[in-house]
Image: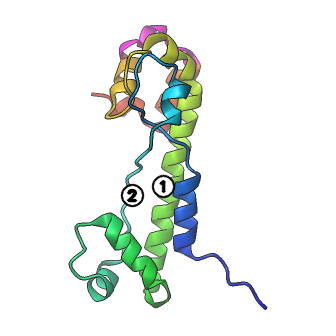
Amino acid sequence: MTRRPASIFTLIAATLLLSFAVAAQETGKPLAEKLKKGTIAVNSTIQGCDEDVKQHCPGLKNKPEKVFMCLSAYEDELTQQCKQGVIDAMLSIQTGLAKIEYSVRSCEADADTFCLDVQPGEGRMLKCLKTNETSLSPKCIGALKETGFWDQVQ
């Protein structure tokens, strides 16, 4: 019996499930402890699926999670353009997760030193780190600049 290759939707689901957790509801604890209990959201848009969504998932256009689940049910019937859009979205999610992981690992000690009472999420941790720029390690600043997070802080 031949084994069917993993579907693109299976790969995306695996990517999301294997990602580590970020953004917790606790303050006063080291970053590693905060991150164990949270979740992460990486925004990505599936391009090239407008016609597929109209055909297979009418009425769901403004509900991305439901559109994704709906499209997965029709994977074998999707246009090549839509399948490529799904793959591109998956790669975007993987890249986003890698940037977050790299930044967290590079800034963990600084976050524990300067931002212990900051609850991760909505840019609060990044803002705290940037506020303490003169005291941060070059490793942390470098990671935040490499990933583009440094410039996202208002």
* Image location (x, y in percent) of residue 29: 48, 19
Task: Kindly indicate the quadrant of the structure image that contains residue 121.
Answer: top left
Q: Is residue 138 above or below residue 2?
A: above
Q: Are marks 1 and 2 in contact (CB under 8 Å)?
A: yes
Structure colour scheme:
rainbow
* Image location (x, y in percent) of residue 146: 51, 34
* Image quarter in which the C terminus is found: top left
Return the mark for residue 93: 1
Q: Tell me which secondary structure the magenta stretch mostly adopts.
A: helix
Residue nearer the viewer, 28 or 10: 28
Q: Residue furthest right?
A: 1
Q: What secondary structure is found at the residue carrying circle 1?
A: helix
Q: Amino acid at mark 2?
A: Ser
Q: Is residue 102 above or below residue 77?
A: above
Q: Is residue 35 magenta?
A: no
Task: Kindly indicate the quadrant of the structure image that contains residue 134.
Answer: top left
* Range covered by the magenta-colored residues: 131-138
* Image quarter in which the N terminus is found: bottom right
Residue nearer the viewer, 104 or 116: 116
Q: What secondary structure is found at the residue carrying circle 2?
A: loop
Return the mark for residue 44: 2
Of pointers 1 and 2, the one earlier in the residue sequence: 2
